[in-house]
Amino acid sequence: MDYKDFGLVNTKRMFSDALSRHYAIPAFNFYNMETLRAIISAARDTRSPVILAVSESALKYMGEDLLRGMIWGLNIKDTDGVALHLDHGSSFESCVNAIKLGFSSVMIDGSKLPFDANAALAKQVSDYAHQYDVTVEAELGVLSGIEDENTKSEKSSYTNPDDVVNFVNATNIDSLAIAIGTSHGAYKRKSDDEELRFDILDAVAKQLPDFPLVLHGASSIPKTFINKINEFGGKMSNARGIAVNQLKQAVKKNICKINVDSDSRLAFTAGVREILSTKPDDFNPRDYLSLGQKYVYDNCIDEIKNIMNSANKL
Ligand code: G3H
Ligand code: 13P
Ligand code: ZN
């Protein structure tokens, strides 16, 4: 199945426009009908391009056929600026499978491999994907936190700016994820004073002036959702994300894709907990899933407008 049959686009034009007009394409992860509907509605209502991101475990959870059915059901047109992206692909085979399913963009995550092995794997994926006009992201440097059910990383290392030109030239990738202090999950920083390493971002951007850079682990972990979760029976007291002003600063530089998963998870959980707690006799899943969906939608709108600066960019 060709992604163009779904009305999807790859990320090439998205990124060149984002770079020249200083905004970031939101890459929101989804894993069910409610999160998908929330994300696509938020993108449509703000006229923002969007990357629908699917991890390997989310793909397994939804099932390949059901995922494709849901994408089909969105009635996307190529003028809508929607890409379907494999997040943290762990192998060449996983990327090939996603491309065959109709993904328009893939990430091959060899970030924990030595430089040469990471580059060789990324090149193998690029060579294959480009035959089908699918764009490829790879990563240099290691983020801490949970990236996927299968890949947990306790040790992080920042991207070395001296490596990036060689890596991009050796791999022919279309975008590069870098490690400048973000991390996956809801517990990113011990204090509000911890800042991103903009010196590294600047040094990378100097080496790769017109090249799309990607920030993973970029959820801001909104206090409103943490407070709601805690108010309605959850326990997430030390959760802390990347400060919104730091993300905005990154967008003004060469970061043109920002990955957000945890914020949507929190928003969804807050909505479900709120209904279950305030209406203990309600056992209709459509009620609590609807509020979860609404909070994900509200959060996507907020981040599109106030972090990504991608509203009205279609
Ligand atoms: O960065 C990766 C995502 O947060 C994926 O997490 O594998 O639990 O869907 P997941
Ligand atoms: P968060 O955990 O910060 O939402 O990061 C998501 C991500 O990087 C998906 O690839
Ligand atoms: Zn990630």
Image (spheres, grey):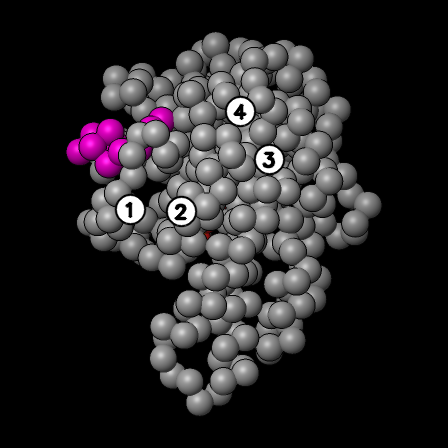
Q: Which of the marked residues, 1 or 3, is nearer the chain's N terminus?
A: 1
Q: What distance separates the C-alpha of mark 2 from that of mark 1?
A: 8 Å
**Residue 76 higher or lower than 171, as above or below:** below
Position of residue 141 measured from the top left corner of the image (x, y, whole percent): 58, 29
Q: Which residue is mark 2?
A: 40
Q: Are marks 2 and 1 in contact (CB under 8 Å)?
A: yes
Name the amino acid, label 4: Ala
Q: Residues within 10 Å of mark 1 (few under 14, many from 20)?
A: some
Please give the name of the residue rendered at 38% of the width and 51% of the height, measured from the top-left corner: 36
Region rendered in magenta: 1-10
221 part of magenta stretch: no
Vertical placement of 261 versus 92: above or below? below
Between 40 and 55, the one nearer to me in the picture: 40
Q: Which mark is residue 74?
A: 1
Residue type (three-letter) at the residue carrying disc 3: Asn
Earlier residue among tags 3 and 2: 2
- Element type at mark 2: helix
Secondary structure of residue under mark 4: helix
